[in-house]
Amino acid sequence: MRKTEKEILAKAVEQFEKLTGLAVEIKQEVKLQKNKIVDARIKIPKLKVNLYAELKANVTNQTLGAVVHQIKELTKGENELLITHYVTPQVAERLKDMNMQFLDTAGNAFINLPNLFLFIKGNKAEEIFGKEKPIRAFQPAGLQLIYALICNPGLEKKPYRMMAEKAMIANGAVTLVVKDLKKLGYLVDMGKQGRRIKNKKELLNRWVNLYAELLRPKLLLGKYRTDNMDWWKHQDLTNAKGLYGGETAAALLTKYLKPQNHTIYIEENYGKLLLQLKLKKDPQGNVEVLKKFWNFNDTMAKNNLVNPILIYADLLATGDNRNVETAKLVYDKEVIRYIRED
DNA sequence: AGCTGCCCTCACTCTTCGTG
DNA sequence: CACGAAGAGTGAGGGCAGCT
């Protein structure tokens, strides 16, 4: 039995005891005849009754038929019971009509025993069950949108579909992320004057950390090696549609460091790039090719560089001391203008 | 009233994760 | 390591607001 199922079992039984004042004994994984195993046996000593319970995390209108059928099949001839996280009022009615006894963690129940009848519906599901739901704005799709928003001042005022296009995510994701950003105070709706980003500096900080943790790992297309040491100084990637990021970009931009590792962002098909740079596949190689996750041009592109915000994030993601120093330079010189509050 | 552009929902697919 | 559940992301389509 899964951990969440165990939690559901404990919670639902607790609700039952509270409702009825009856003490119960639980035994998990009980064998029935023909070696069938049922998730739990709920014994109510006072009523001299056993209920055989099956746990289902979620039961919806669609799945209800199959679930009930499965349980009745399993516990043939016994007192069957469905235990689940939450039963909506509508589902409760249907279960009652099917004479399917149930308990949920919100205290809804249908019990139809010779000397105990219970039918309770309409109790609300507890919001905080297990862990709170994750912030969608800080999932990969959200991070892609935040990047597009910071790189393109004013984009937040544009229609959702345009934001979606620039960030290379679906419209639906924009809805979720915008909601979150509003809740967190990073986006305000000013009615006629449209939406507006707030606290850009703080938002960027969070983005940089989460980028390294959640988005960047998903972008890796491959690791490569090349024998030429200085190739990156004079290779124009325009034809191959590539852009330098990370240490490579920082070196070209600041002349402050000698890159040990190279980062190239590129669109999905990158055969041209491999040919041009004579890159050989090598999991230990020092050239990483990452998938481009934005769909807009900015001023640095003509120099084969990604936006300085991304260079900054790449440098910090390495954790290397020298890189962190360089990141500060890039921040003061280039990034700062993107996070001015206006 | 009809048209247009926009927002947002929802049913679905894809991906990840926990479990036996 | 295969399976199913949960979670994340998708995008067509419904419905609404503002314009003609």
Image (cartoon, coloured by chain):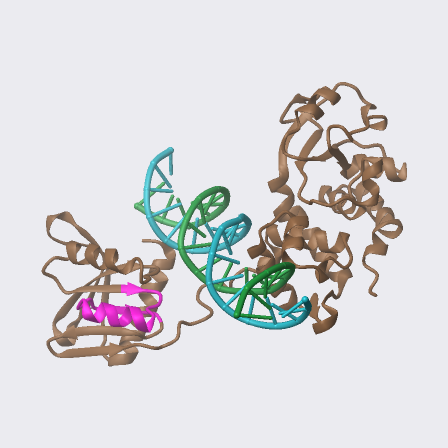
Chain colours: A brown, B green, C cyan
Is A90 inside the magenta-drawn segment?
A: yes
Residue in front for this viewpoint, A209 or A91: A91
- Give the total of numbered labels: 0
The picture quadrant where one finds residue A90 is bottom left
Task: Decide: is A321 above or below A4.
Answer: above
Residue in front for this viewpoint, A304 or A250: A304
Residue A27: x percent and y percent? 23, 61
Task: Decide: is A217 above or below A188.
Answer: above
Is A119 inside the magenta-drawn segment?
A: no
Residue in front for this viewpoint, B9 or A338: B9
Viewer can see residue A28: no
Task: Decide: is A154 above or below B14.
Answer: below
Residue B10: x percent and y percent? 43, 60
Residue drawn at the location 74% of the way across and 21% of the way down: A276
Viewer can see residue A68: yes
Task: Decide: is A181 above or below A29.
Answer: below
Q: Could you tell whether A314 is left or right of A34 in the image? A: right
The picture quadrant where one finds residue A20 is bottom left
The picture quadrant where one finds residue A190 is bottom right
Q: Which residues are magenta?
A: A83-105
Residue A319: x percent and y percent? 73, 44
The C terminus of chain A, quarter of image: bottom right
Residue drawn at the location 65% of the way across and 64% of the way down: A181
Residue A60: x percent and y percent? 33, 62
